[in-house]
Image (cartoon, rainbow, N blue to C red):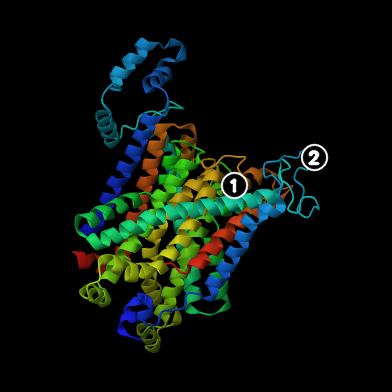
Amino acid sequence: MKQLIATRLFQLVAVVLIVGSISFALMYFLPGDPALRIAAGRYGPDMMDNAISDMVRAELGLDQPVLFRFLAWMGDLIRFDLGHSLVSGAPVLHEIALQLGYTLWLAALAFVLALVIGPLVGAIAGLFPGSIFDRVSLLVAVALRAVPPFVLAIVFMMVFGVTLRWFPTAGFGGWSNMVLPSLTLALGLAAMSSRVMRDAMSEVAASPYFAHGRYKGLSDRTVVMRHGIRNASLPVVTYLGLQMVYLVEGVVVVESIFAFPGIGHALVHAIIARDVPMVQGTALAMGGLFVLLNIIVDLMCLRLDPRLGRRAA
Amino acid sequence: MNTASLTHLPVELRDGAKPAFWQPVRIVGAVILLALLAFAFVGPLVIGADPLFQDYLAVLVAPGDPAHWLGTDHFGRSMAARLVHGAQLSFVMAFVTALSAAVPGIALGILAASRGGWVERGLVALSDIVLALPGLLLVLLLMAFAPGKFGPLYLGLALYLWVEFFRVARIETARVLALPCCEATRLLGFGPFYVFGRIVLPALAGPMMTLFAFAMGSAIIAVSTLSAIHVGLRPPTPELGAMIVELMPYYSEAPLQVLMPAGVIFLLVLSLQLLAGRKS
């Protein structure tokens, strides 16, 4: 348990360090004088002269040595002072707070859908290894794994959005906008986890305790639900930890393709506009989401297999 | 066979029954990959059309036309030429990136396992720091320095992909170095270079080839994804991901033109994943 907390704390610190220092470097190497740029943003390009930009430079400490400015930058970051967007002028924290809700819903929906589809398909395939269902699900999983999320997103958009007109393809106006993006992410996740579940399930189904459950007269349903699913889930949940990379990357990509008003979409826009404070804020939020998802997976592992917690404690 | 020649055998041969490398899945992957390589590298010589040449009298021609056998896109550019050059670009970029991730990754992995101590702890901590963020986020952050440029894209991908090579190389090297045959070879008076050349490197070859194929697949996905969200390589570069997104508005008139680049990406990644076999 202590080990888990230390790992995730280390990860969080690493996220803040990487995002903070890359953003600082971005600000530092961006062409032009930052004091002039900030002065123009504050007082308008017409009102600006050298005296005002010098004032801004002194006020923000832009004439200080690089190391000092870096420490000040990281200090602001730790105090959650993320600055203002260079494009809209709004506080970054405010913009992120708006978008984070959408992203969290999308990620949560995709996560839950993947947890339903993947293990379910895998469990059925694992209970009947070698069956037609097993083989078809293998083919689908192999194919889905080789399709990048953005291609899957575009195919869904074309089939369900343009041709069948079942779901909207862009923006956010209601729950129907969540269907295609979350399904895209969930299918990619489920393709991989279904095979892990299938292998785990066929192993459990061949185990002595599974046979014993049958011999002592438990119904098929009880044996599968009580002894099969729970024991087979552990490798799947552990594997989910590895898949969180896919989920977070997928959120960025799928949000951009579907013009979904979340953090990933904002991150891509901020990069194109070179809006450094927004890049930093959104990247921090996505990194934080990644750490959070990893913690959820850790907790799920602990819940499924209490031995993990006891061994360490 | 005398005892001297036994130590010359690679480890996996001496350890006995390991499954053959050329399983059916791998052969299928290799065949698809070879076909794509022929398409990408012989294709330009056969087709000869310029992937950037625009012909406004032949816009969105459907595939099967005698003059344009794979049709044309919305600017009347030959789809065949663009697909061939796009496949070549993806493949070359993926290969270069994977190579520049593999060489330092494997070298540092061997270094960490053989030196141990603070060198190993430092390198492992460094790799953990890189893994704290999902790879695509790291590449995106670096892309902010120069959107649309090849440099940060290549650097970011290599910076992320080396970690996997490092981790596996470190664990595998440590495992092999602890084997009795290494001990025996050292006691016989052979130097460290001999041990590495004859025992460690042959043992690393298999897992590293697998990782290399996976890394190439990841690089192809990343490059096309970044172009598709307008952060990667810029039009008019014939890049497969950019082609899909550029042609998307014309889907109802020319659905095949959207699907063809998607199909090439799919086959490239699929063949590499099949060739790699199962990860684990």
Residue denoted by label 2: B57
Residue denoted by label 1: B239
Looking at marks 2 and 1 on the same chain, the residue that comes earlier in the sequence is marked by 2
Look at the picture and state if A195 lies above or below A250.
below
Seen at 39% across and 41% down, the residue is A283
Pick the residue in front: A284 or B23. B23
SS at badge 2: loop
Mark 2 surroundings: few (<14), some (14-19) or many (≥20) residues within 10 A: few
SS at badge 1: loop
Mark 1 surroundings: few (<14), some (14-19) or many (≥20) residues within 10 A: many
Question: Chain under label 1?
Answer: B
The amino acid type of the residue labelled 2 equals: Leu
Q: Name the mark on residue B163.
A: none
Q: Quadrant of the N terminus of chain B?
A: bottom left
Pick the residue in front: A55 or B213. B213
Left or right: residue A33 versus residue B62 is left
Measured Cα–Cα span from mark 2 to mark 1: 24 Å
Look at the picture and state if A241 lies above or below A204.
above
* Image coords of residue B211 (percent x, y): 43, 62
Pick the residue in front: B201 or B23. B201
Pick the residue in front: A243 or B92. B92
The amino acid type of the residue labelled 1 equals: Glu
